[in-house]
Image (tube, helix red, strand yellow):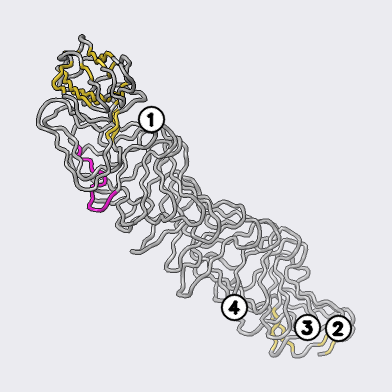
Amino acid sequence: MTIKNKIVRFLVPAATVLAFGTVFVTPASAALTFGATSVTTDAALTFTTVAATDTVIGAATTTGVTTIGGTAQTGTITIGSSSGTNTVAIGSGAGVTTVNIAGGTAANNVNIGIGDTGVKTIAIGTGAAANVVTIGSATGAAAVTLLSGSADVTITSTDDFIWNATDDITLNGGSTGSIINLGTSAFAHVINIGVNALGNTVNIATGGTVANTVNVGTGAIDATITLGNVTAATAVNVNTGTGGSTITTTGAGDFTVASGDDVAINGAGASAAITIGTTAVEHTITVGNVTSATAVNVNTGTGGMLVTTTGAGDFAVASGDDVTLNGVAASDYTVGAATTTGTVTIGGTAQTGAIAIGDTAASVVTEISIGGGNGNKTAINIGDGTGANGINIGTGGTGVKTIAIGNGAAANVVTLGSTNTTSTLALNAGVDDTTGGITITGAINGASPLSFEGATANGFETTLAVTDATADRTVTIPNKTGQVQMASAASVITAGATPTLTVGLSNLYTDTITTDNQDQTITFSAGGTAGDMLTIIFQTDSGGSGDEVITFETTLVNSVGTLTLANATAQRYTVTFISDGTVWNEVARTAIQS
């Protein structure tokens, strides 16, 4: 049937079926109006319009339903299959439209832009309105898959981007070398991971069997990296295997470890080494502080502890209180063992306290060795400064001391005292003459080795002089009480004078007459000490003329009378006196001697 330039109305009862073969409606404007009509064809039903005309189905429908395809549809419903450039608009009117695609209960496949050729641009909810775009559902085993080839997948929002899941959320790169970036755009970001109020576990590079590299804040910018917090029981654990852990700072930035409780640095291995400041740069390493009751404890087991400094740097231990070095009972202490030309000093230049070495109160054998090495040029100086020093050795009031100085088998040279004219040397051996004493073994060198001051410290001393021996001599002191009779150089009496003889032990005087008639009276300075001896040798003048009369005073002398020297040339008389402690008694007078 062909209808041209006509309006055809088919008026049929309800539920009537009209069957057509091929129907052509060709006028410029035509309308087909049906009631509740069903159109059934035995072949394809095609609506064709000219190029610039619109095809509208259900334009007047308001509350009705426009359905394309039946409930038993098994074929393909194609909208916009032209090879030209099409815009397929579904629900694009100004009204509130709900567009449902595959909203049935069957397992549907919805494909958008799946053609293998031609680049598709698929936009969903891109209008400027406040759209809510939902893809997928949270019911059952619903899944959403976003696939991208070599191009990127970009999700952009001017507000929050929220990704929630009741199970795992996984971000993976599809190939080796893939980079997963968070917050890499040119804005200041706050990136929060696991910041809710629940107990979160945040894992970074914890899986796999390949060596991972985890970088945090490694860019060349000023970064502040904070791990953990100071609230409640927060803990930060940094674990390494055999690869080690390195924390490096450069420039003026400090590396600070602060804790409200203990700070522990431990090695877990049997031979673990903990090193601080070992790189070859100039370090200042400070452990502890000087505030309040700060304490620094360094403990070692059997491995010991070594503090080494090189170069000109000093090693100083300073304390506002005591400095104590303690070991166990059998510990050895070594100070300056490696020193060769250096100086080992104990005590400072302003020292006013006491320096005690081996000051033990226990009843044990303590040996203090100073200069006990095998060197040949060891000089031990005690109190050799310019100050007025007091040097005490074995001065304790209790306990018997055995003090040995230079008593080895070597040819030692021991010097006590100095040659200064005002120096003194006191050797005390106690006051008990039954147990005390001084023992001198060997020779006392020197022509005048001993000088005695006496009871009064003045400029006069008695010097014991020894004549240089040509053979071994023995001088025996008798086993008796008394004074040692001394032989001294003869004192000269001036002939004709009235001398007073100064008496002592073993006094010898000579009186030589030089002219005639030089009579004289001789007196004594004191009665002497019992046992003292005084001898006077008289010699006549060489002329041999005149008699000289010698008179001895009678207050301190008991003599046999005057002595008259005969007229003889250069002859001698000898008179000897011995003191009884009160007066001098003449005990011998010789006749003239040639």
* Residue at mark 2: 50
Q: Amino acid at mark 4?
A: Asn
Q: Amino acid at mark 1?
A: Thr
* Residue at mark 4: 109
* Residue at mark 1: 422
State the predominant SS element of the stretch in magenta.
Answer: loop
Q: Amino acid at mark 3?
A: Phe
Q: Return the disc, 4 or 1, that comes first in the chain's sequence.
A: 4
Dividing the picture into quadrants, the one containing residue 36 is bottom right
* Residue 30 drawn at (x, y percent): 86, 79
Residue 352's place in the image compared with 274, above or below, is above
* Residue 432 drawn at (x, y percent): 14, 28
Q: Return the disc, 2 or 1, that comes first in the chain's sequence.
A: 2
Which one is nearer the viewer's eye here, 571 or 258? 571
* Residue at mark 3: 47
Which one is nearer the viewer's eye here, 126 or 5? 126
Which one is nearer the viewer's eye here, 222 or 206? 222
The residue under the point 36% across, 32% down is 423
Mark 3 touching mark 4, by CB under 8 A? no
Q: Return the disc, 3 or 1, that comes first in the chain's sequence.
A: 3
Q: Which residues are magenta?
A: 401-412
